[in-house]
Amino acid sequence: MVSDIRSGLEGRRILQARLSHDDVLRGVSRRALLAGLKGARIRSVTRRAKHAVIETDRNRLVVQPGMTGNLEVRRTELPAAERRYAVLRLELDNGRTLVYQDVRRLGTLLWLDQAGWDRYDQAIGPEPLDRSFTARALQRILEGSRAAVKKVLMDQRSLAGVGNIYAQEALFAARIDPSKPAREVPQSRVAPLRRELVRILRAAIRAKGSTVRDYRTGTGESGQFQLELLVYDRAGEPCLRCGTTLSGTHAIDARITVFCHRCQS
DNA sequence: ACGAGGTCCTGCGAGC
DNA sequence: TGCTCGCAGGACCTCG
């Protein structure tokens, strides 16, 4: 998402900002956000964890899209059917518009000054795609917790950017039981887990993410990685490795977890 | 330190 | 057909 919009945004000035729902804002008022955005120049657009970070010559706009949010640089008006889902619209000085759409509005928008951003950034764990994310680094994360390994992988404070889908896929690929306490994951499985996490996240980014449900009709592109998911949303279907019926449980953090009780231990 | 459970919001599928 | 109901999702919260 970020790589798609970066070139259309960097260096642009925001002429006008419109917000149609206040309930996505965290820690900033509508008035302050809109006043800050209007007239700001976009310096850079980057990704941190699951968030798009739009740095301006004033504050940073941090977009947490959740599962249903989407950022798009458009040269035309939104189709009428999608207009009601547009949460934030930024008119740029080249005639284009940055649109943040979010059907369910579980996504959030933050407007952070330097100190706020530093605090925010420091509270998030390391990026799995950084060089520094070694098997040893993962080992340290896992051995610090008795919670289920899947929960630890999804906890943004321990590791950045891994959500329900990719945690399940990586644990399946590395043959680890998602409910196993993190500190009990055998050392011999840590390097494979790191490798699979990195492989899956890279592949997902390359495929432009996983479009699991498309809430809107007539949208442009959706991600393609859902075609490569081996366990997610496949409870009751055969394991693609051994044929055993995949199990589905809500027992971990009240989130659906699908795994193969035969392959993953 | 941990699990359990609730909250936000809305589309959708199931059931009547 | 038309209704209600429960569920899904990520981050964050409280409670025990």
Image (cartoon, coloured by chain):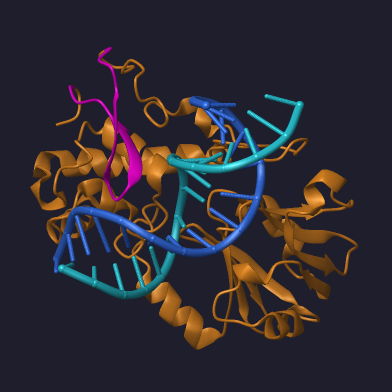
Chain colours: A orange, B blue, C cyan
Please indicate whether residue A57 sits to the left or right of residue A68 in the image.
right
> Could you say where residue A105 lies in the image, as x and y percent from the top left?
61, 58
The C terminus of chain A sits in image quarter? top left
Q: Nearer the viewer, residue B13 or B15?
A: B15
Residue A140 horizontal/vertical position (percent)? 17, 59
**Residue situated furthest top in the rendering:** A243
- Whether residue A155 is visible here, answered yes or no, is yes
Q: Is residue A154 above or below residue C5?
A: below
The residue depicted at 23 percent of the width and 38 percent of the height is A192
Looking at the rendering, the stretch of residues picked out in magenta corresponds to A243-262
Residue A56 screen position, x and y as percent: 67, 77
Pick the front one: A112 or A235: A235
Q: Is residue A120 magenta?
A: no
Q: Quadrant of residue A190?
A: top left
Query: Residue A47: image x %, image y %?
Result: 54, 60
Question: In the figure, is residue C8 to the left or right of A224?
Answer: left
A252 versus A36 height, above or below: above
Q: Residue at x 31, y 18 (%)?
A: A239
**Toward the viewer: A134 or C3?**
C3
Q: Going by the image, does A215 lie left or right of B8?
A: right
Relative to A87, say whether A204 is above or below. Answer: above
Q: Is residue A244 magenta?
A: yes
Picture residue at 89% right of the left edge, 51% below the top? A76
User: In this picture, is A257 found above or below B6?
Assistant: above
